[in-house]
Image: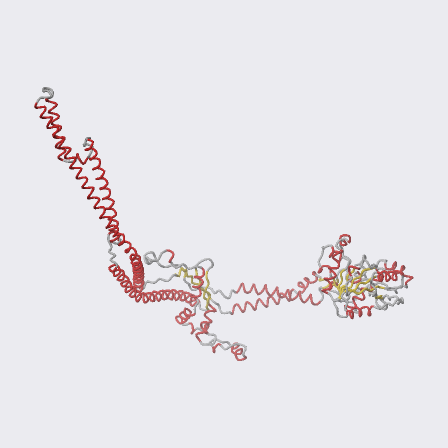
Amino acid sequence: MSGVQSTASDIDIDLGRLFSSLARNWLRTLTVALAATALAFVIAWSATPHYQAETRILIETRESVFTRPESSGENERPILDEEGVTSQVEVISSTDILKQVAKKLDLASRLEFDPAAGMSLAGRLLVIAGLKSDPAEVPPEERVLKAFREKLLVYRVEKSRVIVIEFSSEDPRLAAEVPNAIADAYLAVSRDAKLQSNSAATDWLEPEIADLGRRVKEAEARVAEFRSQSDLLVGQNNSVLATQQLSELSTELSRVRAARGAAEATAQAVRAALDSGGSLDAFPEVLSSSLVQRLREREAQLRADIADLSTTLLDNHPRIRALKSQLADLDRQIRTEAENILKGLSAEATTAQARERQLVADLNTLKAESSRAGEEEVELRALEREAAAQRELLESYLARYREASSRRDGNYLPADARVFSRAIMPSEPYFPKTLPIVIAAFVASLMIMAVITLLQELFSGRAMRPASGARFAPVEQVAMPAPAERVEVAAERTEPLPPVARESEPEPKPELKPIPATSGLGEIDIEHAAEKLIAGGATRALFISPEGDEAAATAVLVAREVADAGLRVLLLDLTASGAASRPMLDSRRLAGITNLLASEAQFTDVIHPDHYSDCHVIPVGTADPVRAMRAADRLPIILESLTTAYDVVIVECGPADADSIRRLVTEDTEILVSVLSPADEVLAARDDLEAGGYGSLTLVTPEGSVSPMSPVPGRSAA
């Protein structure tokens, strides 16, 4: 068996004593802080000052409304979005621009840009020792660029198109000259890029325009040749002549048909009037005749004369008769003229009919011609579209060429950026800031020394104190009673323990309770029981204790013995009083199996370590037993889960019978009966288990072992 093991819960940290160490060591803390502050002040005072200046560039379109090309609309203007501005940041910090600025300002001649020229003795020793690379092995241009980039910072102001160029140097004048030179170089590079692009476009457009001019001429020649071969002459309204003639003939045919119809209708009406002897004054064609008009005038005159003479002469008067004879002759002349007009109308209708027939024949001919012209016109339009497209492309190329050529000749290509804030020579260094450095060094050194002091006090043990309840009172040790004396011993164990002894008083060495002798029923001891569980490969062991709580010590001793052998062991206490788990834990108010069954806790909350071995324990718990028993069906599932996590699960069942443990037994379960003395309870329990089908029972007695019910002193007592 393993000896008594101490736990971390035996001691607590005395916070008052821990933090009082800061007051006891204040002089050392303050001295170190002042020394660190003085050192920081000396370093800051002797450090080389660095100056910083910045130049700001605004990315925007520099074209005005007067110089912007006419072909470029609002959507064609360059819009620099977030990605575009970020790209310009990379352009500004590019190697080409930095090389130009470094060459212009002769930065290679300055020591701060050439680490190889100003290397200290310590640096040379590191190079000789191989702990540092030799800067002289790097080309001078690369050394200058590397130092240049370390001092340069180019970034974009968030949510804007402003780019900031910051540069730091030991020389305040150089700190202002470098960002301004970088900005000027960037603008020059942007203009050169535009000029190069414009020149490339002009050089490309020249041969393209010449080629397009040739192709336009060829396309237009093909259109004219096809038009002449197909006889597709163009008339008015840019239409084919055959189509135009067809339209005109259709219009003329409609007019001739209308005229013929009108002549036929008028002739028929005049003929009907002549046949019926009716009046001919209703026909405009008759009235429009000059002869008819004169005859009508003569008729009116004769009628007037007859009317005048009738007032004085009779009807048979020769003069009146002569006038009436003239009047009748005028009517015959009018009818004769009407007949002549009728003949004219008939002739006009006949002529219109003949004209109509001629027009219909011509119209049919033009229809065939127009159909042929329509088919050929489709191909002609295709040739015209090709020629028009070539012509439009040529005109657009010519316009772009003229614009690009004028810009190149006039050398007007503004960059899409401008410097709106140039760097000025700084008057104060940005590093080192002596006062902030000294304050930070003082505060940091105080904090570091405080932490060091607290750790020293903590690890020395002076800040530790015994935990409440960690010490055990000395208990008078008595021998285990014989079987006849079990009642008296139980009564003796129910007496309250003496109060906890003071640390200054010597604690008596606790005596061990001997276990009763073997009863002669074939029992085995603790070691043999542990060996049987290990050798048999049992994953679950059920201990039955017919003699009550004192016999539960057997399960505790076997569990500790198996744990000492290196196996992962868990003891599950199913007794009503918690007799098995109580000697393994400090408190009885720990979550256990009842809490798990009542769903008040999880596995991690109910598994506790044994204070005196590597065994784990699940106590009875603090939940309502009635509520926990309602979920007793979950107990086999819980045991199965524990079996997968531990090598052996030992269950102390107390004075249980065969029926009550049936749901806990599996194929690889060992059933053991704890025996203190050969009492009737033991024999009755063995017979009950054998009658229930559990024939292979093992009786275990704790003979010669230390009872776990004896109090074991804690660390503070030791």
Residue 537 or 238: which is nearer the viewer?
Answer: 238
How many marks do you count on the picture? 0
**Vertical relation: 362 (above or below) 337:** below
Residue 96 lies, with reference to residue 226, above or below; the image says below
Q: Is residue 265 left or right of residue 25?
A: left
Quadrant location of the C terminus in the rendered image: bottom right
Q: Quadrant of residue 405?
A: bottom left
Q: Residue furthest left?
A: 318
Nearer to the camera, 169 or 306: 306
Q: Which of the 4 image quadrants contains residue 42? A: bottom right
Q: Nearer the viewer, residue 218 or 228?
A: 228
Residue 281: where, in percent of width, then height? 18, 32
Q: Quadrant of the N terminus?
A: bottom right
User: Residue 373 falls in which quadrant of the image?
Assistant: bottom left
Residue 400: where, in percent of width, then height? 32, 61
Which residue sits furthest bottom? 128
Where is residue 518 shown, x and y percent of the image?
88, 67
Q: Residue at x 24, y 56 (%)?
A: 233
- Residue 686 in the figure: left or right of residue 282: right
The answer to whether residue 621 of the structure is visible from this angle is: yes
In the rendered view, would you say 569 is above or below 238? below
In percent of width and height, residue 716 lies at 77, 64
Q: Which residue ends up furthest to the front in the rendered image?
A: 275
Q: Nearer the viewer, residue 464 or 497?
A: 497
Specify the color scheme. secondary structure
Seen in the picture, residue 258 relative to 326 is either above or below; the reply is below
Using the rendered image of the protein, determine whether residue 592 is visible from the camera's viewpoint: no
